[in-house]
């Protein structure tokens, strides 16, 4: 009898376990394309069959939805055949076929006054078989990206100007940005290309400095490709590496743009992913606060120890995009919180994550320059991480990084 009860209990356990596994949700993502030309379909409806839960594709034809494995997703778009697909994994790209069927009859249910009008000219009737089907036009999203006008360094004679300086905080944003443009088949604008940032993007295998010297200076020279009479010299500076265990504690403030312009997958969702990588490397002595801004600025998470990683990760995951962009107010609040938790001798830094599209309060480049210059004397450094495309304001982010004793990188 006891054996029978145990068997029944074990069978029930297997049944419950199987149900729990089957009921687990997964995040399905992918792109919906026009099957005839492989272009993304913007605004495609993605619906979980038998429910009212769904989403639509963004300007890149991409979607992301949480659904139980084994459920069916319905993809529909005006002028295309609806497609149903059973979910078996997380990645799911869809190709919709154009609906070439003609309408046999249209019934309009409404009442109104009949209006007659006299026309001067020829009129003719055509049958439905003579009406050709056509594909909805592909609308290119508007591009409002902004870049500062590029100014070339004038030639200086080394005999008259022998002094050269090196910057400790280098930018690398240009390389990532123009790589994105090239991958999309676009020719980067001249002002988006900054050669020094392309060089700075890479890590070089320079030898460590030896002895009492804190840096090691290396030089390379070659013939200039576009003018054989000149030579190009690259000077590399390698600083002594400090073991991570002996690094000073960090006081970080994540300043995250959650305005409506950050809605797409290459913006706020990417911000969350990149910040999570940083959080997972925090030590107990490090502290993180989170400030967000949209129509107004607010503190989402007070300074929290790196030992409490889950609390920080949960705060990041709960962020949602929507509203206007009061970037100036966000910067002021972030610096205030960084100053409040200032660690003497530590790494005190505001990490700004945005597309740079400020439109409320302090928003012009000159206003942002004045604001950030007033904050840099506080001993708090600034890291600017740029995200997204279409409305990316590179000029404003460059200004923030240069005037705020910081660096600028495009993610």
Image (spheres, rainbow, N blue to C red):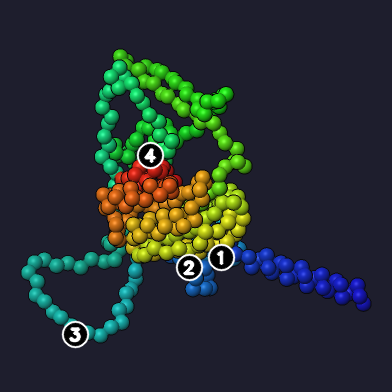
* Residue picked out by circle 1: 67
Marks 3,4: beta carbons within 8 A: no
Q: Earlier in the sequence, mark 3 or mark 4?
A: 3
The residue that appears at 34% across and 24% down in the rendered structure is: 163
Looking at the rendering, which quadrant does residue 111 occupy? bottom left
Q: Secondary structure at mark 4?
A: helix
Q: Give the secondary structure at mark 3.
A: loop
| Residue pointed to by mark 4 | 174
Q: Circle 2 sits on which residue?
A: 54
Local crowd size for mark 2, using a 10 Å CA cut-off: few (<14), some (14–19), many (≥20): some
Q: Crowdedness of circle 3 by 10 Å Cα count: few (<14), some, many (20+)?
A: few
Which of pointers 4 and 1 lies earlier in the amino acid sequence?
Answer: 1
Q: Position of residue 322 (x, y in %)?
A: 39, 64
Distance Cα–Cα, label 3 vs label 2: 40 Å
Q: Nearer the viewer, residue 176 or 363?
A: 363
**Which of the 4 image quarters holds residue 90?**
bottom right
Image: 200 above or below 396? above
Residue contact between numbered discs 4 and 1, judged by CB atoms under 8 Å: no
Q: Which of the two discs, 3 and 2, labels the residue nearer the N terminus?
A: 2
Residue nearest the viewer, comparing 91 with 281: 281
Residue at horizontal 33%, vertical 50%?
Answer: 374
Horizontally, is 118 left or right of 7 in the view? left
Give the residue displayed 27% in from the left and 37% down from the top.
Answer: 150
């Amino acid at each position: 009898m006891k054996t029978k009860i145990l068997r029944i209990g074990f069978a029930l356990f297997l049944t419950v376990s199987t149900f729990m596994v089957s009921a687990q949700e997964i995040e399905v993502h992918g792109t919906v394309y026009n099957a005839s030309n492989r272009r993304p379909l913007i605004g495609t409806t993605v619906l979980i069959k038998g429910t009212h839960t769904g989403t639509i594709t963004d300007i890149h034809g991409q979607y992301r939805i949480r659904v139980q494995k084994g459920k069916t997703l319905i993809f529909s778009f005006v002028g295309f055949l609806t497609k149903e697909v059973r979910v078996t994994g997380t990645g799911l790209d869809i190709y919709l076929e154009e609906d070439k069927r003609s309408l046999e009859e249209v019934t309009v249910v409404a009442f109104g006054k009949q209006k007659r009008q006299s026309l001067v000219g020829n009129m003719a009737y055509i049958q439905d078989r003579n009406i050709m089907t056509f594909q909805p036009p592909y609308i290119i999203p508007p591009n409002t990206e902004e870049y500062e006008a590029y100014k070339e360094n004038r030639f200086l004679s080394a005999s008259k100007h022998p002094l050269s300086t090196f910057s400790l905080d280098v930018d690398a944003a240009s390389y990532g940005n123009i790589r994105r443009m090239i991958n999309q088949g676009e020719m980067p604008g001249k002002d988006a290309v900054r050669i020094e940032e392309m060089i700075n993007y890479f890590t070089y295998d320079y030898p460590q400095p030896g002895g009492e010297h804190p840096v090691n200076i290396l030089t390379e020279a070659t013939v200039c490709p576009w003018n054989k009479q000149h030579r190009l010299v690259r000077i590399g500076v390698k600083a002594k590496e400090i073991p991570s265990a002996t690094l000073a504690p960090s006081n970080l403030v994540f300043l995250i743009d959650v305005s409506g312009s950050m809605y797409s997958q290459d913006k706020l969702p990417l911000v969350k992913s990149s910040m999570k990588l940083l959080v997972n490397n925090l030590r107990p002595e490090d502290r993180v606060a989170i400030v967000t801004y949209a129509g107004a600025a607010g503190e989402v998470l007070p300074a929290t120890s790196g030992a409490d990683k889950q609390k920080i990760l949960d705060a990041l995951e709960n962020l949602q995009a929507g509203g206007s962009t009061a970037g100036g107010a966000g910067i002021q609040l972030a610096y205030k919180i960084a100053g409040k938790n200032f660690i003497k001798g530590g790494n005190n830094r505001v990490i700004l994550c945005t597309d740079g599209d400020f439109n409320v309060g302090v928003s012009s480049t000159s206003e942002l320059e004045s604001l950030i210059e007033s904050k840099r004397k506080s001993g708090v450094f600034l890291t600017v991480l740029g995200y997204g495309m279409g409305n990316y304001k590179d000029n404003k982010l460059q200004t923030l990084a240069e005037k705020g004793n910081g660096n600028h990188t495009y993610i």
